[in-house]
Image (tube, helix red, strand yellow):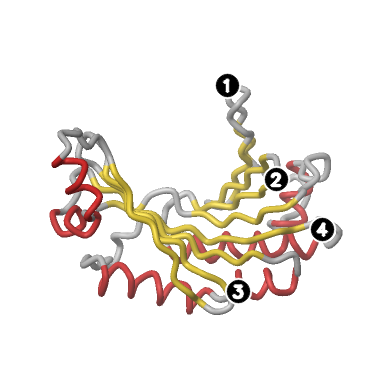
Amino acid sequence: MKPTDWNVVVAGAWNPAILTPHFVLTSLFQEDEGTPIAVEVALDRSVPTRMRHDGIFVVHEPGRLTVAPERPAFQGLWKAAGIAQRAIEELPRTPLVAAGVNVRFKFDEMPPGLTEMRHCKLIDVLVDGDYNIESGALRCTVKLVPGVINIELTENPDGSGLLALNHHLGSANRDELLGWLGMSEKIEAEAKRLTESVFGFTLEPGEEA
């Protein structure tokens, strides 16, 4: 099991003309002008430009702003959430629709317990019908007031897998979204409770990196 691709996403009509490296550095990271900030431009134009500073990536794509720690750990994730909150505060006229905190774990080989958990009656029916199951996923949503946690457990054809926990609040109210991104202790506690009590693995100190 390895943590992977943890991030904070704020969905909305962000203006790319404002989200320049200078704005990101001085307004979101609150650094002085002239402080270095890395701008990573991919040769593939379909891949968005990433701005990196102090262990945090900021990425703008149509309809969303993603802020992510370089290392998938809760400390960095909450630092990213603070940057996302600052973007909402600095650009109050941006129409917003949702905010999400994403915690994901990948498995080189899916543990038997998780494979059994993903198993369902439909799988049995398909196998009995001589269908070859290439991959499968289990999805469900649980309440986490005032939002939800979208849980997805996926098993790939090669036996690897992914567990994704999306802590989601759909709202156009900026104060509600700011509050959601500020619920670090509650979101972290629920993520750990799910991984330990439901899915059966524990994050050891230093493992979430």
Q: Mark 4 is on which residue type? A: Leu
Please name the residue shown 54% across and 79% down the image. 145
Q: Is residue 82 above or below residue 18?
A: below
Q: Which mark is residue 102?
A: none
Outermost residue to the top: 43
- Packing grade of label 1 (10 A; few <14, some 14-19, many >=20) is few
Residue drawn where x is 54% and y is 52% of the image: 68
Residue 68 as seen in the image, left or right of residue 49: left
Q: Identify the residue position indicated by label 2 in the image.
A: 63
Q: What residue did someone put label 3 on?
A: 182
Q: Secondary structure at mark 2?
A: loop
Q: How far apart are the two marked residues, 1 and 3, measured between alpha carbons?
A: 35 Å
Q: Please, what secondary structure does the residue beneath circle 4 have?
A: loop
Labels 1 and 3 touching (C-beta < 8 A): no
Which of the marked residues, 3 or 4, is nearer the chain's N terminus?
Answer: 4
Would you say 115 lies left or right of 69 here? left
Crowd band around label 4 with a 10 angstrom C-alpha radius: few (<14), some (14–19), many (20+) = some
Answer left or right for 182 relative to 30.
left
> Where in the figure is residue 194, as x and y percent of width and height?
33, 71
Q: Helix or strand or loop: what does disc 1 sit on?
A: loop
Which residue is under mark 4?
A: 91
Q: Could you tell which of marks 2 and 3 lies nearer the N-terminus? A: 2
Q: Quick one: 46 or 118, which is closer to the camera?
A: 118
| Label 2 to label 3: alpha-carbon separation | 22 Å
Which residue was labeled with disc 1? Answer: 44
Q: Earlier in the sequence, mark 2 or mark 1?
A: 1
